[in-house]
Image: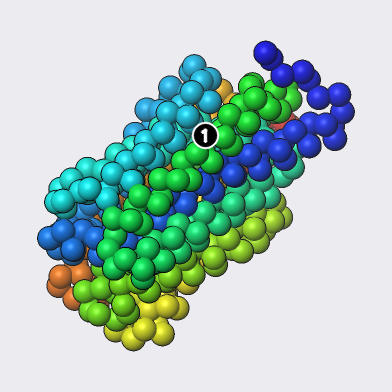
């Protein structure tokens, strides 16, 4: 049954908030499942016989496939507008996580990890497009920031579940099985959200969002690629913590939970910051990336904790601003495609960065730091290129208004 139109602007705002919160609840439960597993994939693969290079390649391949496929799924939802169908199918692949409990080889575990990432590729462009409609009435940055914060609450809870299971049982199997329980919460939240707003496009009024203002897709994509190529993956960080015996196994998920706690607060703050100063908040990413590798790969537990927290701050900044800026700058009929395409760049960068850092780890940590410094310096140059492109676009628009 189609949803009736809101009678007032306040009705529209209230409906948008409810949709954001319901999608946030679905992401919270889903993130609990996926991040609970991701907090230990490094040491788990090591336990099953994998090496540092394999951890880096699996983490990078999972992210690459998960993001690269978003280009195709973004085109699909952009043409067919089957947002809820794609979101539901993608969340369903979270069922791969409990199956890690019975993976006896690192190859099997790797396949399940990649399957879960494929599910994220299927659901994310659809979910983000729905959110882009819902954030019209409440502020792009605030809406995506609240959703990210809720998502990160799950990212905190998941590692705590895994840490408790490790502490009690000494093994990973029970933890992976426990992570299957929140899948019911995902299903309920998605059902309620779709029932509330079957056609999310109606939340963005006619005439709104029908114009492209993205300041050049090439410099924008270049910054995204370089910024993420220098951003370390937590599976490699957790591998380092176990391989060097810096902390006990049961403490590694707690490091991840602490990082996710930081990302919750940062996501809320950066959402408000975006609504005021726009994409300039992205300039913090290069600094955070360099600080992460300098601290997280230290042999000292205190520095490793600090590095994990800095890593969490980076997670809290990048995704909300990326998603909000696309929603703000892309026309409705192209938004799903752009979300998918930029996500593919994002994932390719994560694959390249994770693979390179995994290989460099076997050489020396100093090589990782040098690589990140070089890549992030190039990211700053790409950001300046992006700003210059924005100025050119605005000048052309101004001349177009003066000279018909």
Up the image or down, 120 lies above or below 45; here it is above
Asked if residue 138 is positioned above or below residue 105 in the image, the reply reads above
The image quadrant where one finds the C terminus is top right
Instruction: Give how far across and how far down residue 185 sits, in percent.
Output: 53, 41
Horizontal and vertical percent position of residue 230: 35, 62
Q: Is residue 162 above or below residue 90?
A: below
Label 1 neighbourhood size at 10 Å, few (<14), some (14-19), many (20+)? some
Q: Nearer the viewer, residue 56 or 363?
A: 56
Q: In percent of the image, x 69 and y 15: which residue is there?
A: 2
At mark 1, the secondary structure is: helix
Residue 102 screen position, x and y as percent: 22, 48
Instruction: Give the total number of marks visible in the rendering.
Output: 1
Left of 207 or right of it: where is 57?
A: left
Quadrant (top left/top right/bottom left/bottom right) for the N terminus: top right
Q: Position of residue 215 (x, y in %)?
A: 54, 42
Picture residue at 45% right of the left edge, 57% below the top: 158
In the image, 120: left or right of 109?
Answer: right
* Towards the viewer: 256 or 202: 256
Q: Is residue 374 visible?
A: no
Q: What residue would you read off at disc 1? A: 187
Q: Residue at (24%, 60%) from the top-left corner?
A: 44
**Residue plotted at (55% across, 57% down):** 153
Q: Report the front residue among 88 and 126.
A: 88
């Amino acid at each position: 049954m189609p949803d009736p139109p809101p009678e007032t602007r306040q009705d529209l705002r209230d409906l948008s908030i409810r949709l954001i919160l319901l999608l946030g609840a679905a992401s919270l439960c889903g993130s609990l499942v996926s991040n609970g597993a991701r907090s230990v994939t490094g040491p788990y693969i090591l336990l099953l016989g994998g090496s540092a290079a394999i951890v880096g390649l699996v983490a990078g391949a999972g992210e690459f496939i998960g993001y690269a496929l978003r280009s195709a799924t973004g085109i699909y939802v952009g043409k067919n507008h089957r947002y809820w169908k794609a979101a539901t199918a993608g969340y369903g692949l979270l069922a791969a996580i409990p199956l890690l409990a019975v993976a006896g080889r690192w190859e099997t575990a790797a396949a399940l990890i990649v399957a879960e990432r494929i599910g994220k590729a299927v659901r994310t462009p659809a979910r983000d497009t729905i959110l882009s409609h819902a954030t019209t009435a409440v502020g792009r940055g605030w809406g995506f920031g609240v959703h990210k914060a809720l998502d990160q609450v799950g990212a905190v809870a998941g590692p705590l579940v895994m840490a408790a299971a490790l502490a009690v049982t000494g093994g990973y199997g029970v933890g992976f099985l426990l992570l299957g329980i929140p899948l019911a919460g995902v299903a309920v939240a998605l059902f309620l959200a779709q029932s509330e707003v079957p056609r999310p496009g109606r939340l963005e009024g006619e005439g709104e969002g029908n114009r492209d203002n993205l300041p050049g897709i090439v410099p924008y994509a270049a910054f995204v690629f370089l910024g993420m190529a220098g951003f370390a993956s937590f599976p490699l960080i957790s591998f380092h913590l176990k391989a060097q015996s810096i902390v006990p196994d049961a403490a590694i998920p707690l490091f991840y939970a602490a990082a996710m706690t930081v990302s919750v607060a940062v996501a809320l703050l950066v959402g408000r910051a975006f609504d005021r100063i726009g994409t300039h908040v992205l300039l913090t990413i290069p600094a955070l990336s360099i600080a992460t590798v300098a601290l997280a790969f230290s042999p000292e537990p205190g520095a490793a904790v600090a590095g994990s927290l800095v890593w969490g701050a980076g997670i809290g900044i990048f995704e909300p601003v990326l998603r909000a800026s696309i929603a703000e700058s892309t026309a409705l009929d192209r938004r799903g495609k752009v979300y998918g395409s930029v996500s593919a760049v994002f994932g390719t960068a994560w694959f390249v960065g994770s693979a390179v850092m995994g290989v460099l780890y076997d050489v020396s940590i100093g090589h990782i730091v040098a690589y990140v410094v070089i890549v992030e310096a190039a990211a700053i140059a790409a950001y300046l290129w992006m700003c210059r492109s924005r100025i050119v676009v605005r000048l052309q628009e101004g001349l177009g208004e003066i000279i018909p």
